[in-house]
Amino acid sequence: MNKEVQKSFELLKTYCEAEDFKGYDPYDGLNSRFFQTLPGLSSNRILRLAWIQFFKRFPLNFRTLAGIKKEYNPKALGLFLSGYCQLYQQENKQEYFDKIHLLTNRIREMKSVGWNGSCWGYNFDWQARAFFQPKGTPTVVASAFIANALLDAYQITGEKLLLNEARSTCDFILSNLNRTYDSNGNFAFSYSPLDKSVVFNASLLGSSLLARVFSHTEEKLLYDEGIRSVEYCCSYQQNDGSWCYGLAPFHQWIDNFHTGYNLECLSNFMKYTQTDNFQVQLEKGFNFYIKNFFTEEGISKYYHNRTFPIDIHCPAQLVITLSKLNKLSENIALLDKVLLWTIRNMQTSNGYFYYQINKYFSSRIPYMRWAQAWMFYAFATYIKFESDEKN
């Protein structure tokens, strides 16, 4: 294990545990008590969007002044849970097992209510260009990551209720999400029950979870519905192997970590259903990903065609993508270069990683979900890989 990577992880782990996994989020602007006291403004879609974007983009953190508190984010807790599961598999420490127990309980307490299955949303109102999501509105993205984390914990603890929670999340995906169909009868799952958007990584995350639960329950319905979503999303893969973020005119960008999501979902779907139907699409997509999003010096680019912004989510996703595709060993030189550049340029002496480096300024705000949880999960995955390689 590279000593610099190990030291970086220990600093990050100490920071996150000291914060009790609570923190700010790039999109939590509408949690502002000040903004909520202005009913004429807080009910306006354009002003909600502008308020969120101000807090997301401005490099200084005015959240305390605006009355925004550090909170638990369910998806962040899911990422931390997956990370501790990786650490426990590498070294059976009681402290890791205790954290797994703590996080599973906390996650289960934060479920969104009123839907057909176990599901989770974010701890803030969220105004996007395509839709508005009130606080707690469940999304397929948050729910899939969390359900997968519960399955990671199930593999360690054997607690059947964790498998049951993940199976229940499949009910949410199949019953509560909207669908957009193509002429072949294939479809994409919507991002949430409140919208009809087509976002490829979101639909694929739903399909990947269906496949993983299928590997436990062998329910044909989960396979049949999942593969129709995968077929739909693969039909929109471009000739060079890339995917745009989604179908809407304002979703026509190609970015790093959502491409990584797509690839890990294809890999997981084939792994858990024991098929190789999408191997060509996977390899084509991976070749685009590995050749277009990382520079010679180890910078992770957000977009395929320009360097800035440099976003902390991208190097974290590289570790996860390589791990899911079993390509860590053959790309270890690139991975080490990316991790070391990220540590040296995006980690503070306090241990946390900051959000973004832009061309003219940097945002050093310590977002818990976007930055710390992802880097924690990535480091834990890397550490387990290094341990497995030695044994």
Image (cartoon, rainbow, N blue to C red):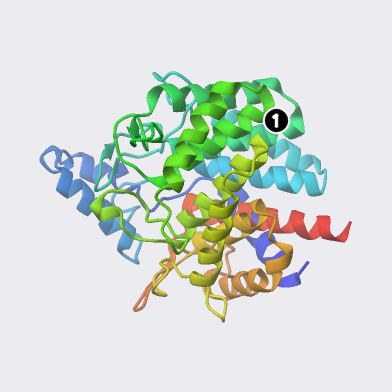
Residue 308 visible to an observer of this rendering: yes
Residue assigned mark 1: 154
Looking at the image, residue 21 lies above or below residue 391 = above
* Residue 327 relative to residue 76: left or right: right
The quarter holding residue 107 reads top right
Residue occupying the point 39% across, 61% down: 254
In the depicted view, which residue is nearer to us: 191 or 381? 191
In the depicted view, which residue is nearer to us: 200 or 279? 279
Residue 177 position in % (x across, y down): 38, 28
In the depicted view, which residue is nearer to us: 359 or 331? 331
Residue 2 position in % (x across, y down): 75, 70
Q: Tell me the kind of residue under disc 1.
A: Tyr
Residue occupying the point 62% across, 49% down: 17
Residue occupying the point 82% across, 48% down: 91
Looking at the image, residue 167 lies above or below residue 255 = above
Residue 72 position in % (x across, y down): 48, 40
